[in-house]
Amino acid sequence: MKEDMGIFKTLALITQLGLSMALPIIIGVVAGKYLDERLGTGYVLLIVFSIIGVLASFRNLYHLAYKSTRKK
């Protein structure tokens, strides 16, 4: 039974890592594309918001890694 809990904790951590990496990038791309279409700025805001999304993803990854290593 204890092994099952370890598997579930690992699966939850992997899922949390994936979501915290993917969601900021997807939101940045969607927001940048929407604003580019709305404001007619070409692909400028798409690139800017994509970079912001990637930076936010790495920040989330750093904080999750820091938090998980600090508990142990």
Image: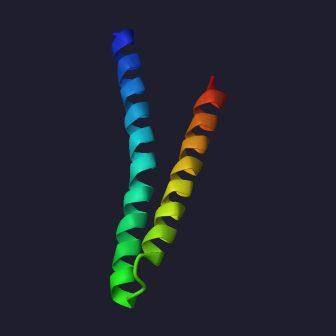
Percent of width and height locating residue 24: 44, 57
Question: Which corner quadrant holds the C terminus?
Answer: top right
The tally of labels here is: 0
Question: Image quarter for residue 71?
Answer: top right
Question: Which corner quadrant holds the N terminus?
Answer: top left
Q: Work out whether residue 15 or residue 30 is closer to the camera in this orientation and state it.
A: 30
Q: Residue furthest bottom?
A: 39
Percent of width and height locating residue 64: 56, 40
Is residue 33 shown above or below 66? below
Q: Residue furthest right?
A: 70
Instruction: Name the residue rendered at 39%, 50% in the picture.
Output: 22
Q: Work out whether residue 44 or residue 29 is closer to the camera in this orientation and state it.
A: 44
Q: Residue furthest front?
A: 42
Instruction: Name the residue rendered at 53%, 63% in the picture.
Output: 52
Left or right: where 66 falls relative to 5: right
Q: Work out whether residue 36 or residue 14 is closer to the camera in this orientation and state it.
A: 36
Question: Image quarter for residue 46?
Answer: bottom left
Q: Work out whether residue 2 or residue 16 is closer to the camera in this orientation and state it.
A: 16
Percent of width and height locating residue 13: 44, 32
Percent of width and height locating residue 11: 36, 28
Instruction: Name the residue rendered at 37%, 10% in the picture.
Output: 3
Q: How is the image coloured?
A: rainbow
